[in-house]
Image (cartoon, grey):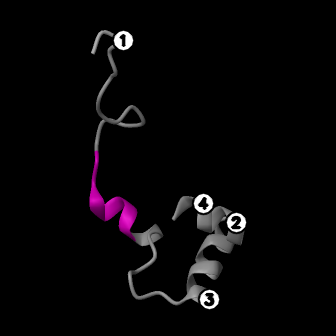
C-alpha cells in the first residue's frame, strides 16, 4: 500500500528447544475452577489481575 515497512524476526528467541512436556506442569487444566486458577497463579506470586491479563 506504499506505507512504511520493516522486517520482523520470526520464531522463539527465549530458547533453542521447545518441549510441551517441560511446560505442562505449570499450565492449569482446561477444566480448572476459578479457585484453582487463582491458587495456581498465586503460587507463582501473580495476582488475580495478572491472571486475567495473561488469560
Residue 11: which numbered mark, if any?
none
Classified by dominant secondary structure, the portion drawn in magenta counts as: helix
Q: Which is more foreground, mark 3 or mark 1?
A: 1
User: Tag 2's secondary structure?
Assistant: helix
Looking at the rendered structure, the number of numbered marks drawn on it comes to 4
Whether 21 is among the magenta residues is: yes
User: Tag 1's secondary structure?
Assistant: loop
Residue 49: which numbered mark, if any?
2
The foreground one among 45 and 35 is: 35
- Please provide the residue range marked out in magenta: 18-24
| Distance of label 3 from label 1 (alpha carbons) | 48 Å
The foreground one among 45 and 47 is: 47
Q: Which residue is mark 3?
A: 35
Mark 2 burial class by Cα count in 10 Å: few <14, some 14-19, many 20+ = few
Q: Is residue 29 above or below residue 26?
A: below
Q: Is residue 24 left or right of residue 40?
A: left
Q: Which is more foreground, mark 2 or mark 1?
A: 1
Amino acid at each position: 500500500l506504499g506505507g512504511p515497512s520493516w522486517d520482523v524476526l520470526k520464531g522463539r528467541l527465549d530458547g533453542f528447544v521447545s518441549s510441551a512436556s517441560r511446560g505442562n506442569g505449570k499450565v492449569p487444566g482446561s477444566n480448572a475452577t476459578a479457585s484453582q486458577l487463582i491458587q495456581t497463579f498465586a503460587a507463582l506470586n501473580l495476582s488475580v489481575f495478572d491472571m486475567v491479563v495473561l488469560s
